[in-house]
Amino acid sequence: MREIIGITLENEMDLILAHKRSMQIGEQLGLTVATRTTLATAVSEVARTVIDFTNEGRLSLCISGKFPRFSINAGITFDSDHVFKETDEGFFYAKKLMPDFNFEVTGQEYSITMALSLPRSAKVDEAKISILRDYFINAVPLNAYEEIKNKNSKLSQLTQAQEQEIKLGRELDEKKNEFISVASHELKTPITVIKAYTQMLRLLKGQYSDKVGEVVEKLEIQTGKLVRLTYQLMDVSKIENGSLQYDLIKIELNSFLEETVTMLTNVHANNKINLQLGDGCSVMADPLRLEQVLSNLIGNAAKYSDKNSAIGVATFLSEEGGSITIQISDHGMGMSKDSIARIFEKFYRVEDIVSSHPGLGMGLYISSKIVADHGGKIWVQSEIGNGSIFYFTLPLAVPFKQ
Ligand code: ADP
Protein backbone atom coordinates (compact mmCIF):
# COMPACT_ATOMS: atom_id res chain seq x y z
CA MET A 1 0.00 0.00 0.00
CA ARG A 2 1.50 3.38 -1.02
CA GLU A 3 0.06 6.43 0.69
CA ILE A 4 -0.53 9.33 -1.68
CA ILE A 5 -2.30 11.73 0.70
CA GLY A 6 -2.69 11.79 4.49
CA ILE A 7 -5.06 14.17 6.26
CA THR A 8 -5.70 14.37 9.99
CA LEU A 9 -9.39 14.76 10.72
CA GLU A 10 -9.74 17.35 13.44
CA ASN A 11 -12.67 19.60 12.47
CA GLU A 12 -15.18 20.55 9.79
CA MET A 13 -12.49 22.28 7.70
CA ASP A 14 -10.84 18.89 7.24
CA LEU A 15 -14.04 17.58 5.65
CA ILE A 16 -13.55 20.08 2.83
CA LEU A 17 -9.92 19.01 2.44
CA ALA A 18 -10.85 15.31 2.49
CA HIS A 19 -13.55 15.84 -0.16
CA LYS A 20 -11.44 18.03 -2.45
CA ARG A 21 -8.33 15.88 -2.25
CA SER A 22 -10.39 12.72 -2.94
CA MET A 23 -11.81 14.40 -6.03
CA GLN A 24 -8.33 15.48 -7.13
CA ILE A 25 -6.77 12.06 -6.73
CA GLY A 26 -9.60 10.63 -8.80
CA GLU A 27 -9.00 13.29 -11.43
CA GLN A 28 -5.25 12.56 -11.53
CA LEU A 29 -6.04 8.87 -12.01
CA GLY A 30 -8.34 9.70 -14.89
CA LEU A 31 -11.52 8.42 -13.18
CA THR A 32 -14.87 9.58 -14.49
CA VAL A 33 -16.57 12.48 -12.71
CA ALA A 34 -19.20 10.07 -11.38
CA THR A 35 -16.57 7.71 -9.90
CA ARG A 36 -14.60 10.57 -8.37
CA THR A 37 -17.75 11.97 -6.81
CA THR A 38 -18.65 8.53 -5.42
CA LEU A 39 -15.23 8.18 -3.79
CA ALA A 40 -15.22 11.73 -2.41
CA THR A 41 -18.78 11.44 -1.05
CA ALA A 42 -18.07 8.10 0.67
CA VAL A 43 -14.91 9.54 2.24
CA SER A 44 -16.83 12.64 3.40
CA GLU A 45 -19.65 10.54 4.91
CA VAL A 46 -17.23 8.47 7.00
CA ALA A 47 -15.09 11.50 7.92
CA ARG A 48 -18.15 13.50 9.03
CA THR A 49 -19.34 10.70 11.33
CA VAL A 50 -15.85 10.41 12.84
CA ILE A 51 -15.38 14.17 13.28
CA ASP A 52 -18.74 14.39 15.09
CA PHE A 53 -17.31 12.35 17.98
CA THR A 54 -13.52 12.63 17.90
CA ASN A 55 -10.74 14.85 16.59
CA GLU A 56 -8.21 12.01 16.53
CA GLY A 57 -9.03 10.60 13.08
CA ARG A 58 -6.71 10.23 10.11
CA LEU A 59 -7.55 9.72 6.46
CA SER A 60 -5.08 7.94 4.25
CA LEU A 61 -5.63 7.78 0.49
CA CYS A 62 -3.46 4.98 -0.90
CA ILE A 63 -2.89 2.92 -4.00
CA SER A 64 -2.63 -0.81 -3.43
CA GLY A 65 -2.13 -3.84 -5.65
CA LYS A 66 0.35 -5.00 -8.26
CA PHE A 67 0.68 -4.35 -11.95
CA PRO A 68 -1.70 -4.51 -13.78
CA ARG A 69 -4.42 -4.63 -11.09
CA PHE A 70 -4.44 -1.64 -8.77
CA SER A 71 -7.08 -0.14 -6.56
CA ILE A 72 -7.48 3.09 -4.67
CA ASN A 73 -8.02 2.73 -0.93
CA ALA A 74 -9.41 5.26 1.48
CA GLY A 75 -8.59 4.31 5.05
CA ILE A 76 -9.83 6.17 8.11
CA THR A 77 -8.39 5.23 11.49
CA PHE A 78 -9.22 6.71 14.88
CA ASP A 79 -9.35 6.03 18.60
CA SER A 80 -12.52 6.79 20.51
CA ASP A 81 -14.34 5.78 23.65
CA HIS A 82 -17.62 6.50 21.82
CA VAL A 83 -19.01 3.23 20.49
CA PHE A 84 -19.29 3.29 16.69
CA LYS A 85 -21.21 0.66 14.70
CA GLU A 86 -20.94 -0.32 11.07
CA THR A 87 -24.59 0.62 10.71
CA ASP A 88 -24.11 4.24 11.90
CA GLU A 89 -25.63 6.65 9.38
CA GLY A 90 -22.47 7.96 7.67
CA PHE A 91 -20.90 4.50 7.45
CA PHE A 92 -24.17 3.04 6.12
CA TYR A 93 -24.26 5.53 3.19
CA ALA A 94 -20.56 5.12 2.48
CA LYS A 95 -21.00 1.35 2.29
CA LYS A 96 -23.82 1.81 -0.19
CA LEU A 97 -21.54 3.96 -2.37
CA MET A 98 -18.46 1.76 -1.98
CA PRO A 99 -19.48 -1.91 -1.55
CA ASP A 100 -15.86 -2.91 -0.84
CA PHE A 101 -16.22 -1.49 2.66
CA ASN A 102 -14.45 -2.91 5.68
CA PHE A 103 -15.15 -1.93 9.30
CA GLU A 104 -12.79 -3.18 12.03
CA VAL A 105 -12.70 -2.45 15.72
CA THR A 106 -10.19 -3.53 18.38
CA GLY A 107 -11.01 -2.09 21.79
CA GLN A 108 -11.21 1.65 21.15
CA GLU A 109 -9.28 1.52 17.89
CA TYR A 110 -11.35 1.76 14.72
CA SER A 111 -10.28 1.21 11.15
CA ILE A 112 -12.51 1.73 8.13
CA THR A 113 -11.27 0.97 4.64
CA MET A 114 -12.99 1.45 1.34
CA ALA A 115 -11.49 0.23 -1.92
CA LEU A 116 -12.21 0.93 -5.56
CA SER A 117 -10.59 -1.04 -8.39
CA LEU A 118 -8.85 1.13 -10.92
CA PRO A 119 -9.61 0.54 -14.58
CA ARG A 120 -6.75 -0.45 -16.89
CA SER A 121 -7.36 2.83 -18.71
CA ALA A 122 -5.93 4.59 -15.63
CA LYS A 123 -2.54 3.12 -16.75
CA VAL A 124 -1.24 2.86 -13.19
CA ASP A 125 2.26 1.55 -12.60
CA GLU A 126 4.95 2.19 -9.96
CA ALA A 127 6.31 5.21 -11.84
CA LYS A 128 2.87 6.79 -12.03
CA ILE A 129 2.30 6.17 -8.29
CA SER A 130 5.57 7.94 -7.54
CA ILE A 131 4.66 10.90 -9.77
CA LEU A 132 1.24 11.06 -8.11
CA ARG A 133 2.75 11.10 -4.62
CA ASP A 134 5.18 13.90 -5.57
CA TYR A 135 2.32 15.81 -7.16
CA PHE A 136 0.37 15.90 -3.88
CA ILE A 137 3.46 16.52 -1.71
CA ASN A 138 4.20 19.62 -3.78
CA ALA A 139 0.58 20.62 -4.39
CA VAL A 140 -0.35 24.21 -3.57
CA PRO A 141 -2.50 24.28 -0.39
CA LEU A 142 -6.22 24.34 -1.17
CA ASN A 143 -6.87 27.18 1.26
CA ALA A 144 -5.26 29.13 4.12
CA TYR A 145 -6.43 26.46 6.56
CA GLU A 146 -4.49 23.73 4.75
CA GLU A 147 -1.44 25.96 4.52
CA ILE A 148 -1.44 26.47 8.30
CA LYS A 149 -2.18 22.80 8.88
CA ASN A 150 0.79 21.77 6.70
CA LYS A 151 3.08 24.19 8.52
CA ASN A 152 1.89 22.92 11.89
CA SER A 153 2.41 19.35 10.79
CA LYS A 154 5.98 20.11 9.64
CA LEU A 155 6.62 21.91 12.91
CA SER A 156 5.30 19.04 14.98
CA GLN A 157 7.37 16.56 12.94
CA LEU A 158 10.43 18.70 13.64
CA THR A 159 9.57 18.88 17.34
CA GLN A 160 9.09 15.13 17.46
CA ALA A 161 12.43 14.54 15.75
CA GLN A 162 14.12 16.92 18.18
CA GLU A 163 12.48 15.27 21.18
CA GLN A 164 13.62 11.90 19.89
CA GLU A 165 17.16 13.23 19.51
CA ILE A 166 17.12 14.66 23.05
CA LYS A 167 15.80 11.34 24.39
CA LEU A 168 18.51 9.42 22.56
CA GLY A 169 21.15 11.85 23.84
CA ARG A 170 19.87 11.42 27.39
CA GLU A 171 19.93 7.64 27.08
CA LEU A 172 23.48 7.71 25.73
CA ASP A 173 24.52 10.04 28.55
CA GLU A 174 22.98 7.70 31.13
CA LYS A 175 24.83 4.73 29.62
CA LYS A 176 28.08 6.71 29.62
CA ASN A 177 27.58 7.69 33.27
CA GLU A 178 26.85 4.11 34.21
CA PHE A 179 30.01 2.99 32.44
CA ILE A 180 32.10 5.68 34.19
CA SER A 181 30.67 4.67 37.55
CA VAL A 182 31.32 0.93 37.06
CA ALA A 183 34.74 1.44 35.44
CA SER A 184 36.01 3.80 38.15
CA HIS A 185 34.90 1.48 40.96
CA GLU A 186 36.45 -1.54 39.22
CA LEU A 187 39.71 0.39 38.76
CA LYS A 188 39.87 1.65 42.31
CA THR A 189 40.60 -1.67 44.05
CA PRO A 190 43.55 -2.91 41.95
CA ILE A 191 45.06 0.59 41.83
CA THR A 192 44.85 0.93 45.62
CA VAL A 193 46.63 -2.44 45.95
CA ILE A 194 49.37 -1.40 43.47
CA LYS A 195 49.79 1.85 45.38
CA ALA A 196 50.16 0.00 48.68
CA TYR A 197 52.80 -2.35 47.17
CA THR A 198 54.83 0.54 45.72
CA GLN A 199 54.77 2.23 49.13
CA MET A 200 56.00 -1.03 50.72
CA LEU A 201 58.79 -1.23 48.12
CA ARG A 202 59.83 2.31 49.01
CA LEU A 203 60.17 1.29 52.66
CA LEU A 204 62.53 -1.52 51.62
CA LYS A 205 64.84 1.00 49.93
CA GLY A 206 68.11 -0.27 51.42
CA GLN A 207 67.49 -3.78 50.08
CA TYR A 208 67.72 -3.04 46.38
CA SER A 209 70.04 -1.21 43.99
CA ASP A 210 69.75 2.46 42.97
CA LYS A 211 68.62 1.36 39.50
CA VAL A 212 65.66 -0.52 41.03
CA GLY A 213 65.09 2.52 43.28
CA GLU A 214 64.64 4.70 40.18
CA VAL A 215 62.09 2.25 38.78
CA VAL A 216 60.19 2.23 42.09
CA GLU A 217 60.09 6.03 42.07
CA LYS A 218 58.72 6.09 38.51
CA LEU A 219 56.21 3.42 39.45
CA GLU A 220 55.03 5.54 42.35
CA ILE A 221 54.63 8.68 40.21
CA GLN A 222 52.62 6.84 37.56
CA THR A 223 50.49 5.09 40.19
CA GLY A 224 49.75 8.50 41.73
CA LYS A 225 48.51 9.71 38.32
CA LEU A 226 46.31 6.65 37.94
CA VAL A 227 44.87 7.15 41.42
CA ARG A 228 44.06 10.79 40.64
CA LEU A 229 42.38 9.88 37.35
CA THR A 230 40.33 7.15 39.02
CA TYR A 231 39.17 9.53 41.75
CA GLN A 232 38.30 12.14 39.07
CA LEU A 233 36.21 9.53 37.25
CA MET A 234 34.46 8.69 40.51
CA ASP A 235 33.80 12.39 41.14
CA VAL A 236 32.28 12.84 37.68
CA SER A 237 30.02 9.89 38.36
CA LYS A 238 29.06 11.34 41.77
CA ILE A 239 28.25 14.72 40.15
CA GLU A 240 25.97 12.99 37.65
CA ASN A 241 24.20 11.07 40.44
CA GLY A 242 23.98 14.16 42.63
CA SER A 243 25.89 12.36 45.37
CA LEU A 244 28.95 14.59 45.71
CA GLN A 245 29.00 15.42 49.42
CA TYR A 246 30.83 18.02 51.44
CA ASP A 247 32.06 18.21 55.04
CA LEU A 248 32.01 21.94 55.59
CA ILE A 249 34.14 23.48 58.28
CA LYS A 250 35.28 27.01 58.99
CA ILE A 251 38.67 27.51 57.32
CA GLU A 252 41.10 30.34 57.93
CA LEU A 253 41.90 30.93 54.28
CA ASN A 254 45.40 32.46 54.38
CA SER A 255 46.97 29.69 56.43
CA PHE A 256 45.11 27.09 54.39
CA LEU A 257 46.49 28.59 51.16
CA GLU A 258 50.02 28.74 52.60
CA GLU A 259 49.91 25.05 53.51
CA THR A 260 48.36 23.97 50.22
CA VAL A 261 50.74 26.03 48.09
CA THR A 262 53.74 24.66 50.02
CA MET A 263 52.52 21.13 49.38
CA LEU A 264 51.93 21.89 45.67
CA THR A 265 55.35 23.56 45.36
CA ASN A 266 56.86 20.14 46.10
CA VAL A 267 54.68 18.54 43.43
CA HIS A 268 55.51 21.17 40.78
CA ALA A 269 59.13 21.68 41.71
CA ASN A 270 60.00 23.20 38.30
CA ASN A 271 57.62 26.13 38.66
CA LYS A 272 57.98 28.92 41.15
CA ILE A 273 54.64 29.58 42.81
CA ASN A 274 54.29 33.16 44.11
CA LEU A 275 51.69 33.54 46.81
CA GLN A 276 50.27 37.00 47.47
CA LEU A 277 47.80 36.91 50.31
CA GLY A 278 45.22 39.63 50.88
CA ASP A 279 43.38 40.38 54.14
CA GLY A 280 42.82 37.39 56.39
CA CYS A 281 39.34 35.89 56.31
CA SER A 282 37.54 32.63 56.87
CA VAL A 283 35.27 30.60 54.62
CA MET A 284 32.95 27.63 55.16
CA ALA A 285 34.36 24.91 52.94
CA ASP A 286 35.26 21.26 52.63
CA PRO A 287 39.09 21.40 52.97
CA LEU A 288 39.74 18.32 50.81
CA ARG A 289 37.52 19.63 48.01
CA LEU A 290 39.02 23.13 48.24
CA GLU A 291 42.48 21.60 48.01
CA GLN A 292 41.27 19.64 44.97
CA VAL A 293 40.24 22.87 43.19
CA LEU A 294 43.57 24.57 43.96
CA SER A 295 45.50 21.48 42.97
CA ASN A 296 43.62 21.32 39.63
CA LEU A 297 44.10 25.01 38.82
CA ILE A 298 47.75 25.15 39.90
CA GLY A 299 48.39 21.78 38.23
CA ASN A 300 46.92 23.07 34.96
CA ALA A 301 48.92 26.31 35.26
CA ALA A 302 52.07 24.16 35.46
CA LYS A 303 50.98 21.65 32.81
CA TYR A 304 50.03 24.23 30.16
CA SER A 305 53.08 26.51 30.68
CA ASP A 306 56.80 26.25 29.93
CA LYS A 307 58.77 24.26 32.44
CA ASN A 308 60.29 26.98 34.58
CA SER A 309 57.65 29.68 34.25
CA ALA A 310 56.16 31.31 37.33
CA ILE A 311 52.66 30.75 38.67
CA GLY A 312 50.85 33.34 40.75
CA VAL A 313 48.31 32.72 43.50
CA ALA A 314 46.65 35.81 44.96
CA THR A 315 43.53 36.69 46.92
CA PHE A 316 41.44 39.83 47.17
CA LEU A 317 38.20 40.70 48.87
CA SER A 318 35.16 41.78 46.89
CA GLU A 319 34.26 45.45 47.17
CA GLU A 320 31.17 44.77 49.21
CA GLY A 321 33.18 42.44 51.49
CA GLY A 322 30.90 39.41 51.12
CA SER A 323 33.26 37.12 49.23
CA ILE A 324 36.90 36.42 48.56
CA THR A 325 38.36 35.93 45.08
CA ILE A 326 41.25 33.54 44.59
CA GLN A 327 43.28 34.04 41.46
CA ILE A 328 45.68 31.59 39.80
CA SER A 329 47.72 33.03 36.94
CA ASP A 330 50.25 31.56 34.55
CA HIS A 331 52.37 32.67 31.59
CA GLY A 332 51.54 29.61 29.52
CA MET A 333 49.91 28.88 26.18
CA GLY A 334 46.57 30.56 27.00
CA MET A 335 43.44 29.73 25.04
CA SER A 336 41.01 31.06 22.44
CA LYS A 337 37.60 32.68 23.10
CA ASP A 338 35.87 29.53 21.82
CA SER A 339 37.78 27.39 24.31
CA ILE A 340 37.06 29.81 27.16
CA ALA A 341 33.34 29.34 26.46
CA ARG A 342 33.62 25.55 26.77
CA ILE A 343 36.43 25.02 29.25
CA PHE A 344 34.20 23.99 32.18
CA GLU A 345 32.27 21.41 30.15
CA LYS A 346 32.62 17.75 31.03
CA PHE A 347 35.48 16.07 29.06
CA TYR A 348 36.27 19.25 27.11
CA ARG A 349 39.91 19.61 26.05
CA VAL A 350 41.44 22.17 23.70
CA GLU A 351 42.03 20.34 20.42
CA ASP A 352 45.64 21.50 19.96
CA ILE A 353 46.85 19.91 23.19
CA VAL A 354 45.00 16.59 23.04
CA SER A 355 47.99 14.61 21.75
CA SER A 356 50.72 16.64 23.46
CA HIS A 357 49.41 16.91 27.05
CA PRO A 358 47.90 14.03 29.04
CA GLY A 359 44.47 14.48 30.65
CA LEU A 360 40.81 13.64 30.30
CA GLY A 361 39.14 17.06 30.58
CA MET A 362 37.49 16.34 33.94
CA GLY A 363 39.42 18.64 36.34
CA LEU A 364 37.79 21.96 35.48
CA TYR A 365 34.34 20.40 35.24
CA ILE A 366 34.72 18.98 38.76
CA SER A 367 36.29 22.22 40.09
CA SER A 368 33.44 24.32 38.70
CA LYS A 369 30.92 22.04 40.36
CA ILE A 370 32.76 22.18 43.70
CA VAL A 371 33.00 25.99 43.56
CA ALA A 372 29.30 26.32 42.62
CA ASP A 373 28.31 23.95 45.45
CA HIS A 374 30.20 26.22 47.86
CA GLY A 375 28.14 29.18 46.62
CA GLY A 376 30.97 30.64 44.52
CA LYS A 377 31.72 31.39 40.87
CA ILE A 378 34.60 30.37 38.62
CA TRP A 379 35.80 31.98 35.39
CA VAL A 380 38.89 32.52 33.28
CA GLN A 381 40.59 35.32 31.39
CA SER A 382 42.98 34.17 28.73
CA GLU A 383 44.55 34.90 25.38
CA ILE A 384 46.43 32.54 23.13
CA GLY A 385 50.16 32.85 23.83
CA ASN A 386 49.63 35.23 26.75
CA GLY A 387 48.82 32.95 29.65
CA SER A 388 45.64 32.49 31.64
CA ILE A 389 44.16 33.79 34.87
CA PHE A 390 41.60 31.59 36.58
CA TYR A 391 39.42 33.19 39.27
CA PHE A 392 37.06 31.66 41.74
CA THR A 393 35.11 33.19 44.57
CA LEU A 394 33.95 31.83 47.91
CA PRO A 395 31.43 33.50 50.21
CA LEU A 396 32.99 34.61 53.49
CA ALA A 397 31.96 32.80 56.68
CA VAL A 398 31.78 36.23 58.35
CA PRO A 399 31.31 39.25 56.06
CA PHE A 400 34.31 41.55 56.14
CA LYS A 401 33.82 45.09 57.49
CA GLN A 402 36.25 47.71 56.11
P1 ADP B 1 42.75 18.21 31.56
O1 ADP B 1 43.83 19.14 31.97
O2 ADP B 1 42.85 16.86 32.20
O3 ADP B 1 42.59 18.13 30.09
P2 ADP B 1 40.87 20.13 32.73
O4 ADP B 1 39.40 19.99 32.86
O5 ADP B 1 41.64 20.47 33.94
O6 ADP B 1 41.36 18.76 32.10
O7 ADP B 1 41.14 21.22 31.63
C1 ADP B 1 40.36 21.23 30.44
C2 ADP B 1 41.15 21.85 29.28
O8 ADP B 1 41.32 23.24 29.52
C3 ADP B 1 42.56 21.33 29.13
O9 ADP B 1 42.56 20.16 28.35
C4 ADP B 1 43.28 22.48 28.46
O10 ADP B 1 43.05 22.42 27.07
C5 ADP B 1 42.55 23.70 28.99
N1 ADP B 1 43.27 24.37 30.11
C6 ADP B 1 43.01 24.24 31.43
N2 ADP B 1 43.82 25.02 32.17
C7 ADP B 1 44.58 25.69 31.28
C8 ADP B 1 45.63 26.69 31.41
N3 ADP B 1 46.03 27.12 32.60
N4 ADP B 1 46.19 27.15 30.27
C9 ADP B 1 45.79 26.73 29.05
N5 ADP B 1 44.83 25.79 28.87
C10 ADP B 1 44.23 25.29 29.96
Image: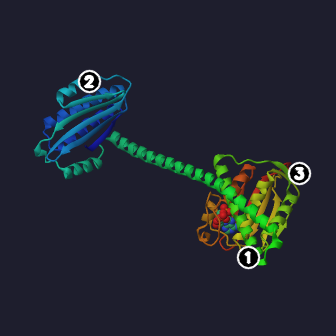
Please state which amino acid type lies under the numbered disc 1. Answer: Lys
* SS of the residue under disc 2: loop
Asked if the residues shown at circle 1 and circle 2 are in contact, with their CB atoms under 8 angstroms apart, the answer is no
In the rendered image, is residue 335 in sight?
yes
Q: Nearer the viewer, mark 3 or mark 1?
A: 1
Label 3 CA crowd tier, 10 Å (few <14, some 14–19, many 20+): few
Label 2 CA crowd tier, 10 Å (few <14, some 14–19, many 20+): some
* Mark 1 vs mark 2, CA separation in Å: 86 Å
Say the numbered circle drawn on residue 401.
3
* SS of the residue under disc 3: loop
Label 1 CA crowd tier, 10 Å (few <14, some 14–19, many 20+): some
Residue 118 at x, y percent in the picture: 15, 41
* SS of the residue under disc 1: loop
Q: Nearer the viewer, mark 2 or mark 3?
A: 2
Residue placed most toward the observer, 238 or 202? 202
Does label 3 or label 1 sit earlier along the sequence? 1
Residue that sits furthest to the left in the current view: 121
Say the numbered circle drawn on residue 86.
2
Residue 253 at x, y percent in the picture: 85, 56
Q: Choose top left, top right, bottom left or bottom right for residue 343.
A: bottom right
